Image (cartoon, rainbow, N blue to C red):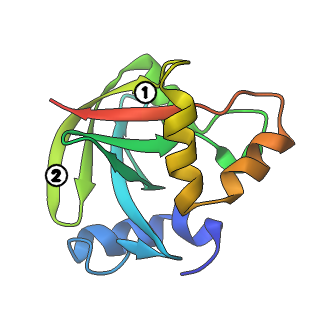
Amino acid sequence: MSSVDDLHGDPHVEEYLRTGGEQGYHWNGTEILILFTTGNKSGEERRHALIFRPWGENAYLVVASKGGTDAPPAWFRNLEANPDAAVQIKDERFAVRARVATDEEKPQMWARMVEVWPDYDAYQAKTSRVIPVVVLERV
């Protein structure tokens, strides 16, 4: 798996979950988690493979970039409607509550994410939308 489409497709998620992260946790030099959200329209569970970085002892950072498109990703809209979600890292699944990084937090968090995926800067340059960093805090 090498393209961004490969990361965001169902096969990546399914393989990750089937193997407890043995397949799919490492992707293009990054680490991947699976985010479980509740669909804001359907009410059904949705699963998303996302690049992440730990933040402190009980939080994880993800970026709602959608490749720099003008619309945010569906998972971000789901979290706006219901910030209670779950994350799986390797074979451990746990509850999280999502929030958007504050203006004070974001520069340092953004820099941390760009360290592992430099394309985030290019994505931000492509859109007038302010791409948020989302903090997933263990509950």
Q: Residue 21 occupies which quadrant of the picture?
A: bottom left
Q: Is residue 2 left or right of residue 126?
A: left
Q: In this view, does 46 lie above or below 76?
A: below
Tell me if label 1 and label 2 are in contact, CB under 8 Å.
no
Q: What element carries label 1?
A: helix
At x 26%, y 80%, the residue is 22
Q: Is residue 120 left or right of residue 76?
A: right
Q: Where is residue 131 in the image (x, y as percent from the top left)?
A: 66, 33
Decide which of 107, 54 is in the foreground and name it: 107
Q: Is residue 122 above or below residue 37?
A: below
Q: Name the residue under label 2.
A: 93
Q: Is residue 4 above or below residue 134?
A: below
Q: In this view, does 109 lie to the left or right of 97?
A: right
Decide which of 72, 103 is in the foreground and name it: 103
At x 40%, y 66%, the residue is 31
Q: Name the residue under label 1.
A: 79
Q: What residue type is labelled 1?
A: Leu
Q: What residue type is labelled 2?
A: Arg
